[in-house]
Image (spheres, rainbow, N blue to C red):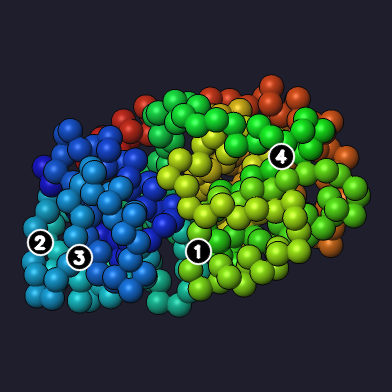
Amino acid sequence: MKILFYNEAIISGGIEKCLELLSRELKTDYEIEIVYTDDTKFDENIFNILSQNAYVHKLKENETIIADICIWCRLYFDYEKISKQIIAQKYYLWIHSKPRELPNCLLDNSEFMNTIEKIICVSETVKQEAGFLEKSIVIHNFVDRNIHELASKIDNPFADISNDTLKLVIVSRISSEKGFDRAKQFVETLIQNDIKFVLKIVGKGRNKEPIIRATFSKYKQVEFLGYKENPFPYIKNSDYLLVLSDYESWGNVITEAKVLGTPCIVADFPSAKEQIKDHENGIIVPLVSDNYTLLLKDLFKMQPILHHNLEDFSYINEIDSWKKILQ
């Protein structure tokens, strides 16, 4: 059976990571093909990673591809054109992002939605926001089955940092919607309260990255490390992972941190409470805050409690859910 995923562009992002992990799990039972159309933001490294488990290529003009199931991975693309080139027995929609964030969302295109047999939502929040509840199923994004091995593959990147220094990490695309304004406020609050810390930022961005880097340039405690194919040692060996985004449909990196035993400080975006129980297995902070002084009281006091309450996450149930809907 041939499963075709249409993802408009091959970039460094959450969707691409999910495609990598899912295609790795499905490739023994299915023929996996990943098609894209926009190469203006093409990331060769991500292309090579995806190509290890799937046939990845750009859809050519006037090319026709036939599949058993086509899974659209985006809510915004030229459906009228692309639908003429991708012919499938069944069409599914996989929603990773905030529904209707921009005009012309395909959820509001009746011609498109009439063809969709199933909608896979990465969280209950996305399911409720998208609507079409009768067609929808929640399948959470899962973690790499080799995560513990990968997390121990290199030496502790914080090994040279003293024990009295707070070790923080952000693993994220470097873009404004990922909450780097909040991260800057948090950094300034730590400095104002004379708290020793380091913040390592793992990831890369596009147009906004130089601007965001510049806003942190005066802080010697902050280090931008760029893209890391294996970010898990940074997560595992930090005291806290920061996820301060404006919105996350489902925070993949939050799940990864929980599995690795690292508590998270998470902004109060809609799906946050699906992954974090405030002051039980993480800390949720307001989306809007002048400073984070009150949070500082909890950082050291809560850390042992948060570590104790972190639960493991099984990828088996999520993979089984995928295989069930693909039957």
Depth check: 120 or 142 in front?
Answer: 142
Q: Are circles 4 and 2 on residues that touch, CB within 8 Å? A: no
Q: Helix or strand or loop: what does disc 2 sit on?
A: strand
Residue 282's place in the image compared with 202, above or below, is above
Residue 151's place in the image compared with 125, above or below, is above
Q: Are circles 2 and 3 on residues that touch, CB within 8 Å? A: no
Q: Helix or strand or loop: what does disc 3 sit on?
A: strand
Q: Helix or strand or loop: what does disc 4 sit on?
A: strand
| Residue 275 image offset from top left, x and y in percent | 59, 39
| Residue 131 image offset from top left, x and y in percent | 44, 58
- Measured in 3D between alpha carbons, the distance from the residue under mark 3 to the one under mark 1, in whole angstroms, is 22 Å
Q: Quadrant of residue 326?
A: top left
Q: Please tell me the numbered disc located at residue 167.
A: 4
Q: Residues within 10 Å of mark 1 (few under 14, many from 20)?
A: some
Residue under the image location 74 percent in, 51 percent down: 221
Q: Indicate the amino acid at tag 4.
A: Lys
Q: Indicate the amino acid at tag 1.
A: Gly
| 2 vs 3, front mark | 3
Q: Residues within 10 Å of mark 2 (few under 14, many from 20)?
A: some
- Measured in 3D between alpha carbons, the distance from the residue under mark 2 to the one under mark 3, in whole angstroms, is 11 Å
Q: Residues within 10 Å of mark 3 (few under 14, many from 20)?
A: some
Residue carrying label 1: 205
Q: Earlier in the sequence, mark 1 or mark 4?
A: 4
Residue carrying label 3: 58
Residue under the image location 20 percent in, 76 percent down: 81
Depth check: 232 or 217 in front?
Answer: 217
Left or right, residue 125 beside residue 170: left
Q: Indicate the amino acid at tag 2.
A: Ile
Q: Which quarter of the image is occupied by the N terminus? A: top left
